[in-house]
Image: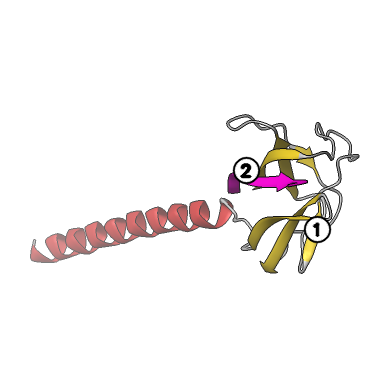
């Protein structure tokens, strides 16, 4: 009879181990499948009456980032960029498809995000043109 109880205890331990392994596998799958966004250090600047994104480290591939240039805070109309975001800088082009601003004197609010993850790098950074 003792032999049966030892076998039953071993079976319970194996079932608990299997349950732990399943939970760990689910956790690993979840963490690895969420993906990530590229690490970049970017600031905004005005240069020669154009808005620039100055990149000090990292990069984002062409077609993987979006920007917004607005004349007021709190609203974003995202524009797909067709150039790579990389050092030293990228000039935002108001003639790109979907752009809703023109290059003229004034205060603009610039936002930047990673397209596939939706991660916002910054929102409503102020750039003043033609000061």
Indicate the secondary structure of the residue bearing disc 1.
Answer: strand
For discs 2 and 1, the disc positioned in front in the rendered view: 1
- The part of the image, by quadrant, that contains residue 42 is bottom right
Q: Residues within 10 Å of mark 1 (few under 14, many from 20)?
A: some
Magenta residue span: 120-131
Q: Quadrant of the N terminus?
A: bottom left
Q: In terms of sequence position, does the residue under pointer 2 or pointer 1 come before the other? A: 1
Residue 96 picture location, percent across and down: 89, 40
Q: Is residue 58 visible?
A: no
Q: Is residue 33 visible?
A: yes
**Residue drawn 24% across the image and 61% down it:** 13
Task: Residue under label 2, please give it.
Answer: 118
Query: Farthest residue in the front direction?
Result: 131
Q: Magenta stretch mostly in which secondary structure?
A: strand
Report the front residue among 115 and 94.
94
Q: Measured along the vertical axis of the image, is residue 126 above or below residue 61?
A: above
Task: Residue under label 1, please give it.
Answer: 90
Residue 36 picture location, percent across and down: 59, 56
Indicate the secondary structure of the residue bearing disc 2.
Answer: loop
Query: Which mark is on residue 3?
Result: none
**Residue drawn 64% across the image and 63% down it:** 40
């Amino acid at each position: 009879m003792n032999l049966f109880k030892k076998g039953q205890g071993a079976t319970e331990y194996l079932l608990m181990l299997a349950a732990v392994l399943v939970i760990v596998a689910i956790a690993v799958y979840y963490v690895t499948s969420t993906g990530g966004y590229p690490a970049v250090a970017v600031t905004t600047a005005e240069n020669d009456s154009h808005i620039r994104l100055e990149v000090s480290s990292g990069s984002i591939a062409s077609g993987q980032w979006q920007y917004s240039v607005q004349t007021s805070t709190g609203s974003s109309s995202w524009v797909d960029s067709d150039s790579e975001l990389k050092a030293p800088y990228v000039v935002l082009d108001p003639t790109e498809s979907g752009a809703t601003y023109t290059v003229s004197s004034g205060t603009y609010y610039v936002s930047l995000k990673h397209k596939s993850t939706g991660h916002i790098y910054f929102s409503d950074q102020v750039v003043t043109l033609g000061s």
